[in-house]
Image (tube, rainbow, N blue to C red):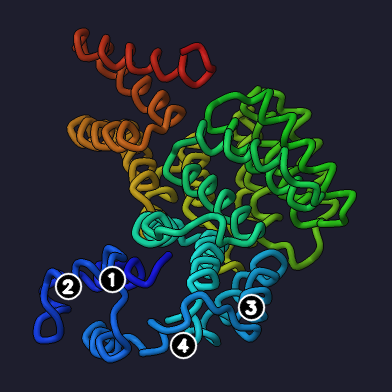
Amino acid sequence: MKLGNRIKRIRLLKGLKQADICHGIISPTHYSNIENCRYTPSIDTLKLLAGRLEVPERYFHNIYEDTTEMQNILSALESKIEKESVEEVRQFLDLHKVQFQYIPSVRQEYYFMLLKFLALVKMEQDNLAIELYENEISKVEIDESQLFVSTRYQYLYVTAVYHYYVGDYKISGEMFKRLLLTSEDQLLKARISYNIAMSHYHLCQFEFALSYAIEAKDLYLKLHEWMKAGDSYNLISILLIEKNEFKQAIEFIDRGLNICRPEFHNLKALLHHNYAFILFQTDQLDEALLQIDFAIKYKKTVSYADKFVSKRLRLEILLKLNQLETLECEMDILENSILTNKQRAGYYFLVAKVEYEKGNFVKYEDFIQQSIEIFKEHIDLKELKQASEHYATYLAMNKKYKKAFEMQLLCTECLKKYVGES
């Protein structure tokens, strides 16, 4: 990044036009030349521009000079993202908020952007991470030859994660595989293998995903990274559930629970949730309810845990048990747990099924249609298949054959994509 690029980026982040900045200081043409790196402004001009943009003067000086102090802070942040708790990462960012706001060195500032992206992902603030990548990281014009090897690696890793979060799973997986070939660090290889497994999972390529998940699990166990090994056991159980290999899935859940330390509340919640789902699928409903209550109990102790998915499964179990009165009493709790549009679609789907059981078919149609449209938007094949199948059956029973046929086609298309046939 050159000085002109930095000035332009700050202006755009503040939502200002070129004329807003240069008025009364220099001509629009002169200012345009500065932003386009065709002219280097004088110290006096830089001082005035810094004042207009409301940034410290030092932010426009010595932009290629790294400082030992900032490097130490960035190294500490990187270590905390890798090893420490979410709360410790959050506290560290708050503690150094002023120092992070305007980092003079372009290399160190860029590295901080990459680390901040990973911190946001760790804190499960995915939307903010995506915004950071799209609005800042991807807009930085920087010469790769100026970057340290670690920064180039981190850029590739962050870009792969970004593509994962926006649903470009194929691109994400390919980028992670490139990184896997270049890394000799066993911890990094484990992390990348896990991420490749997740990319294959979303592409419904469960056999490929399983091989990478097992590789990640083995590496984490050798490194005594018990939390991450437990996460890998959890992922393996999910993949086996997708293959309807429930007995094996339970074995891996048990192994995951066996290596859990007392403080691994979120991991315990995930494993108990998956066990509850298996019991739900095999109609062992009372035991499923017990297991999902364990999952919810553990999630209540973790501020960043996704509580919606477990609360929804609990209500699905109650629906299958035909405990409608208890279920309806808890619907508000579920709605208050919604964090994303996809979760809202899941909520609508559940409400639709409840209205169906009560015989309120006008409300059923309204909610099931809303859920299907959101699932389409978010390309959630599994949920879309289930919702369209439910609606198709209802429509056929009511002799609305044309619409039922459309829903059945949608269901079939989702199934083919889900099992990798198209």
Residue beneath label 1, please? 39
User: Can residue 141 be seen in the rendering of this structure?
Assistant: yes
* In the depicted structure, whether residue 351 falls above or below residue 77: above
Name the kind of residue labelled 1 in the image: Tyr
Q: Which mark is residue 71?
A: 3
Between residue 72 and residue 262, name the one nearer to us.
72
Residue at the right extreme?
A: 222
Mark 2 and mark 1 in contact? Answer it, CB < 8 Å: yes
Q: Is residue 229 left or right of residue 349?
A: right
Label 3 packing within 10 angstroms: few (<14), some (14-19), many (20+): some
Residue beneath label 4, please? 98
Seen at 71% across and 28% down, the residue is 246
Name the kind of residue labelled 4 in the image: Val
Seen at 77% across and 28% down, the residue is 247
Q: Is residue 38 left or right of residue 421?
A: left
Mark 1 and mark 4 in contact? Answer it, CB < 8 Å: no
Res. 233 image quadrant: top right
Mark 3 and mark 1 in contact? Answer it, CB < 8 Å: no
Q: Earlier in the sequence, mark 2 or mark 3?
A: 2
Label 1 packing within 10 angstroms: few (<14), some (14-19), many (20+): some
Helix, strand or loop for disc 1: loop
Residue beneath label 2, please? 30
Between residue 368 and residue 380, name the one nearer to us.
380
Q: Earlier in the sequence, mark 3 or mark 1?
A: 1
For marks 3 and 1, give the CA distance: 30 Å
Q: Earlier in the sequence, mark 3 or mark 4?
A: 3
